[in-house]
Amino acid sequence: MNCYVLYCQSYKIENLCQRFNQKEGIEAFIPQIEKHLHSTNELVLKPLFPGYLFIKTKMNQIEFDTFLLLMKEEKNGVIRELKKDDVSALTKDEIHLLKLLLNEQYILKMSKGYKQTNKTIIIEGPLKQLQEHIISVNKREHFAILNIEFLNRRIKAGIEMQDKEI
C-alpha cells in the first residue's frame, strides 16, 4: 500500500477528500488531532497537517500521476503533489509513524503522562511507544513536541499531564 500527500486549498479539502473516496481503490483522509481548548476546557478535532490530504492506494507513482491527470476538473483545489526526487509516496518509516500515531479514524488522540525527574512517562495513548522522542511538554496548553520531523515540521501531539504516577 502506498500513501501519497496532496497539498490542497484548505476550504476545498473536505470536498476533495469525499471525491477521492468515491474512486475505486482509493482511501483519502485528513489526519486530525485532539486539541485541548484552554478557554473552554474541552477537546476539539483540528487538522494535524492543515491543507494536506493523504491518499492510500495500491497504485504506484506512475499510475497515481496518470490518475491525477485524468481527474481534470474533479481535482479542483489540489495545489500540488508533495514529491521528493520524483517520488511522492511516503516512505515505509513515515507510514509506520502514521500508524503509530493515528487511530482507525485517522485521529491523533490525547496521551496521558506524568513527569518523573526530568523525563516524561506516558501511561496511555499513542505517545507511549514514542516517549523517548519527547523533547518538551507544555503542561498548560496540553501538548508535547517530538524530535521527529514529518512534512518538514516537528510532530506536536496532545498530552494530559498528571501530577504523579497513578
Image: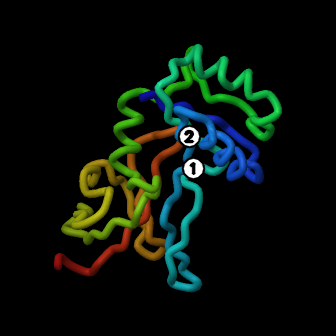
The x and y percentages for residue 122 are 25, 63
Residue 107 seen in render: yes
Q: Earlier in the sequence, mark 2 or mark 1?
A: 1
The x and y percentages for residue 62 are 59, 14
Total numbered labels placed on residues in the image:
2
Up-down relation of residue 42 to residue 58 (above or below): below
The x and y percentages for residue 13 are 70, 48
Instruction: Mark 1: give few (<14), some (14-19) or many (20+) Cα within 10 Å.
Output: many
136 to the left or right of 125: right
Residue type at mark 1 is Ile
Q: Residue at x 65, y 29 (%)?
A: 81
Please name the residue that numbered disc 2 is placed on: 54
Please name the residue that numbered disc 1 is placed on: 30
For residue 46, which quarter of the picture?
A: bottom right
Circles 2 and 1: CB distance less than 8 Å?
yes
Up-down relation of residue 132 to residue 65 (above or below): below
Residue type at mark 2 is Phe
Q: Residue at x 26, y 66 (%)?
A: 124
Residue 118 seen in render: no
Quarter of the C terminus within the rendering = bottom left
Query: Could you tell me which secondary element the residue under label 2 belongs to?
Result: strand
For residue 16, which quarter of the picture?
A: top right
The x and y percentages for residue 34 are 48, 66
130 or 23: nearer the viewer: 23
Query: Could you tell me which secondary element the residue under label 1 belongs to?
Result: loop
